[in-house]
């Protein structure tokens, strides 16, 4: 009986810690994409995404590898924000990047993120509903 209780406590602790980690990640994505609700044109929460960067980010995506993650995307009239569990990965404004649809539900967002060491190129490949609509709206406003 004691063994069964010990096993239940261990698995309960593991499940609770996993829940807390996932909650913290989703909270960080949500905080990184906060804009006034009346400005949001489109948003997508928790979409599957691949992040490509040309420089390593401490405790974040690594350079020259595929970084699979969940991402939140928020599109307003003047910017497109992409956030992951590492915070705001990319913010595109007029002339600052490109957004295009490469297939059904496939949205590719490219731009630069400023760092202390200089600009870092970021590419995000996300699976979103109505990728064509996202690309059309964004290309009107953010074409570089």
Image: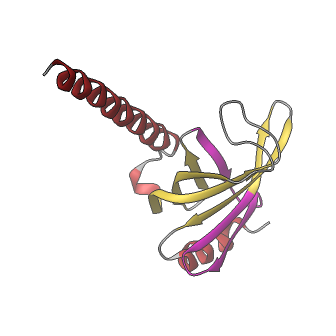
Q: Quadrant of residue 63?
A: top right
Please, is residue 23 above or below residue 35 in the view? Answer: above
Quadrant of image for the C terminus: bottom right
Looking at the image, which residue sits at the far left? 1
Looking at the image, which residue sits at the far right? 118
Residue 79 in view, yes or no: no
Residue 75 percent location from the top left of the image: 54, 60
Looking at the image, which residue sits at the far top? 2
Q: Along the line of sight, which residue is nearer the eye, 9 or 38?
A: 9
Residue 118 in view, yes or no: yes
Residue 119 percent location from the top left of the image: 84, 43
**Start-end of magenta stretch:** 86-110
Residue 73 percent location from the top left of the image: 53, 56
Q: Along the line of sight, which residue is nearer the eye, 108 or 66?
A: 66
Residue drawn at x 24%, y 23% as measured from the top left: 9
Q: Along the line of sight, which residue is nearer the eye, 38 or 6?
A: 6
Q: How many marks?
A: 0
Residue drawn at x 66%, y 37% as measured from the top left: 60
Tell me the chief SS of the magenta region: strand
Q: Quadrant of residue 17?
A: top left
Residue drawn at x 82%, y 41% as measured from the top left: 55
Quadrant of image for the N terminus: top left
Residue 21 percent location from the top left of the image: 42, 33
Describe the colour scheme in one phrase: secondary structure
Please, is residue 103 above or below residue 4 in the view? Answer: below
Residue drawn at x 60%, y 73% as measured from the top left: 106
In reply to whether residue 103 is colored magenta, the answer given is yes
Q: Quadrant of residue 117?
A: top right
Q: Is residue 3 left or right of residue 99?
A: left
Q: Is residue 77 left or right of residue 108?
A: left
């Amino acid at each position: 009986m004691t063994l069964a209780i010990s096993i239940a406590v261990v698995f309960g602790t593991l499940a609770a810690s996993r829940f807390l980690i996932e909650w913290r990640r989703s909270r960080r994505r949500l905080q990184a994409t906060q804009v006034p609700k009346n400005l949001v044109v489109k948003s997508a929460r928790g979409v599957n995404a691949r992040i490509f960067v040309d420089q390593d980010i401490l405790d974040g995506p690594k350079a020259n590898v595929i970084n699979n993650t969940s991402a939140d995307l928020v599109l307003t009239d003047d910017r497109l924000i992409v956030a992951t569990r590492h915070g705001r990965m990319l913010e595109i404004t007029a002339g600052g990047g490109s957004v295009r649809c490469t297939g059904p539900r496939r949205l590719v967002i490219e731009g630069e993120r400023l760092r202390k060491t200089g600009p870092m190129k970021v590419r995000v490949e996300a699976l979103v509903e109505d990728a064509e609509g996202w690309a059309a709206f964004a290309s009107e406003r953010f074409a570089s």
